[in-house]
Amino acid sequence: QVYLDESGGGLVQAGGSLNLSCVASGRTSTLAVGWFRQAPGKEREFVAAISWRAVTVTLADSAKGRFLISRDNAKNTVYLQMNSLKPEDTAVYYCAAKFRNYWDPDNGSSSYDYWGQGTQVTVSS
């Protein structure tokens, strides 16, 4: 079993930054991790993903040039550094994980087996 705990959300003005963290516990080896977000009235959407050994990362077009995903396996933690935030980034951000010791290009939410409870990010204009 895997448990995921997100933190770092909050209220920030447009143009500001936030650094989200996702701490995994339980069985943590070979976890590929993704970040998703869901705004009110909208479907959950992919934001970023990182492979187990951080060899491969992928970002949604909306995140490219502004967000960075990284991980520290010694701390069982994946980070999402969000810069130049916009009001349209407002959403609940979820961390998700799946066991993959190879790069899996499927970024669909259904490919992930474990989910955190989410952390709210609100960007004011």
Image (tube, helix red, strand yellow):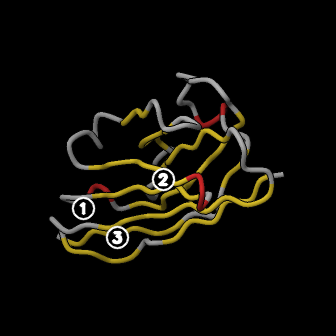
Callout 3, which amino acid?
Thr
Which residue shows up at 45% across the image and 57% down it?
79
The spot of residue 21 in percent (x, y) is 49, 64
Which residue shows up at 15% across the image and 65% down it?
15
Q: Which of 86/52 is in front? A: 52
For the residues marked 2 and 3, what is the alpha-carbon distance in whole angstroms? 12 Å
Q: Earlier in the sequence, mark 2 or mark 3?
A: 2
- Badge 2 vs badge 3, beta-carbon distance below 8 Å: no
Callout 2, which amino acid?
Gln
Which residue shows up at 73% across the image and 41% down it?
113
Q: Helix, strand or loop at disc 2?
A: strand
Q: Helix, strand or loop at disc 3?
A: strand
Q: Helix, strand or loop at disc 1?
A: helix
The single residue placed furthest to the right in the displayed view is 1
For the residues marked 3 and 1, what is the alpha-carbon distance in whole angstroms? 7 Å
Residue for badge 3: 122
The spot of residue 108 in percent (x, y) is 56, 31
Residue for badge 2: 38
Residue for badge 1: 87
